Image (cartoon, rainbow, N blue to C red):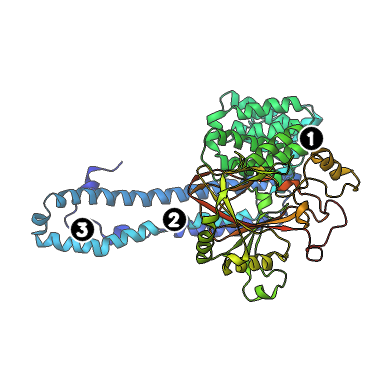
Amino acid sequence: MESEGKTEIDEQSCLSPNTLQTLPFVTMKLQVSVLLVAWFGVLGCVQAEFFTSIGHMTDLIYAEKDLVQSLKEYILVEEAKLSKIKSWASKMEALTSKSAADPEGYLAHPVNAYKLVKRLNTEWSTLEDLVLQDSAAGFIANLSVQRQFFPTDEDETGAAKALMRLQDTYKLDPDTISKGELPGTKYQAVMSADDCFGMGRSAYNEGDYYHTVLWMEQVLKQLDAGEEAVTTKAQVLDYLSYAVFQLGDLRRALELTRRLLSLGTKYQAVMSADDCFGMGRSAYNEGDYYHTVLWMEQVLKQLDAGEEAVTTKAQVLDYLSYAVFQLGDLRRALELTRRLLSLGKKTPKRQKRLFCRYHDGNGTPQLLIAPFKEEDEWDSPHIVRYYDVMSDEEIQRIKEIAKPKLARATVRDPKTGVLTVASYRVSKSSWLEEDDDPVVARVNRRMQHITGLTVKTAELLQVANYGMGGQYEPHFDFSRRPFDSGLKTEGNRLATFLNYNDEQDVFKHLGTGNRVATFLNYMSDVEAGGATVFPDLGAAIWPKKGTAVFWYNLLRSGEGDYRTRHAACPVLVGCKWVSNKWFHERGQEFLRPCGSTEVD
């Protein structure tokens, strides 16, 4: 405790530089030097593996004792330093309380004015030097030198194995060992819950799940009894449930997992959804699908409860569905996959397969100097987006030409082949010929250069404008009617024949074959809604003025690619304008050669 005399204001000098001189570390440094020389001699011959020799381990006792002494000396120095700082703070507090009450009156005395300048210029700098003194230098030097002779991870693992060997040889249970109740021992040695957790973790890291279970159960026992520890029940249950699973007791593993998850808010408060996702992803990368499932389910639980996170449900379901599949639960894997696809998101693994590039139409002369920016929207089937396909001026001109011709969009009845309006297609459309305006011909040529397909057999440029809630429900752009009745009705063709044999060949009158590809231009931005979606893929492509998307409707074999079923979502806010070009098979024989199998 400070005496009253030490807190009085010294009118001559509140803090003399001499009272803040560097503390005498000479003695301590000398002791450290002697210590280092001594222990170099004692430990110089030790080459780790302390656990293999009690003789070598006795040297560690003395090393640890000296470290404790060095630590105590460091504490004394820090306390002395802190005492001086506290004394200075007390004096300054008393002085400033007096001066701040009447600053002008206080400074009216010239001595007070001088001492204020002197304190701020000199004495506070001296205090700064004191605060910045590194009192720990001696202790850290001592610790750093001795650390090279400390036991290693190998020693700790070896010591844990040795204890387990004694446990097995003499049939000792973890409770007996943790209480130190061993016959013939002179000293009592008790293992804390953290010590027992270290034993269990060492066994786990060695793949010894039998001993992992024994020691983790001991940790739980001590924690349940109220022992305070750094180790949490969540950590113990995580190791224990997996070890039990590895030993084949699936039912108990699930019980332990439920107990882990039932920790509820206490457990969730420790780890956010993003934290849990990190745990699950780490397990996945290690091929540990059991823990992947546990952690990803926890993430879903927290996300479903409304927790905000960077992690998305699509990312979680992507990992979870595959991990469940790897564990053999095919039915649940399919359920999770359907849920994933319903989200309409690009998963992390799929995102890695999508790229951006400059597209020159495979060497098309017109695009060599000015290639288009191409972005993958989906990998299989391949759906790409092109940027800056149409200028604002071209879009405006096409709208002007199309508006007078707009009429309610129709669909072809699959049974009769007759065009008719339908409630599931809410838009107006018109068809533009190249003779209508030079801009139409220019846009047609551009689509030909980008796709590498000929427009000679393509349909006219269709322009569509969507009205209130404008939409087009899921449909195929290609005709599902088999073109050649002589084809073998096997596999894909059998499905086509059985399901769509009654449909009309809607393109037969054109003489250009089926619709091989679709090129869709977005001629407006849409504030909300209006996406082009592929329900079977879970893909959603949002309108962006001046861009275009392209995909093939047919496989190289000529068979329809049923994955390309798509729809135009209702426009919630905004006005949606699009134009599209449907390319047909005829004329593309050498531009897009057939594949060798019907699934090419």
Residue 328 is tagged as 1
SS category of the residue bearing label 1: loop
Taking the spot 73% from the left edge, 36% from the top edge, the residue there is 334
Q: Which residue is mark 2?
A: 135
> For the N terminus, which image quadrant?
top left
Badge 2: residue crowd in 10 Å (few <14, some 14–19, many ≥20): many
Cα–Cα gap, marks 1 and 2: 61 Å
Q: Is residue 63 left or right of residue 27?
A: right
Q: Quadrant of the C terminus?
A: bottom right
Asked whether disc 2 touches disc 3, contact meaning CB atoms under 8 Å apart, the reply is: no
Residue that label 3 marks: 13
* Neighbours of disc 1 within 10 Å: few (<14), some (14-19), many (20+): few
* Left or right, 321 with reference to 597: left
Q: Amino acid at mark 3?
A: Ser
Rendered position, 390 above or below 274? below
Give the residue drawn at x 56%, y 58%.
34
Which residue type carries mark 1? Gly
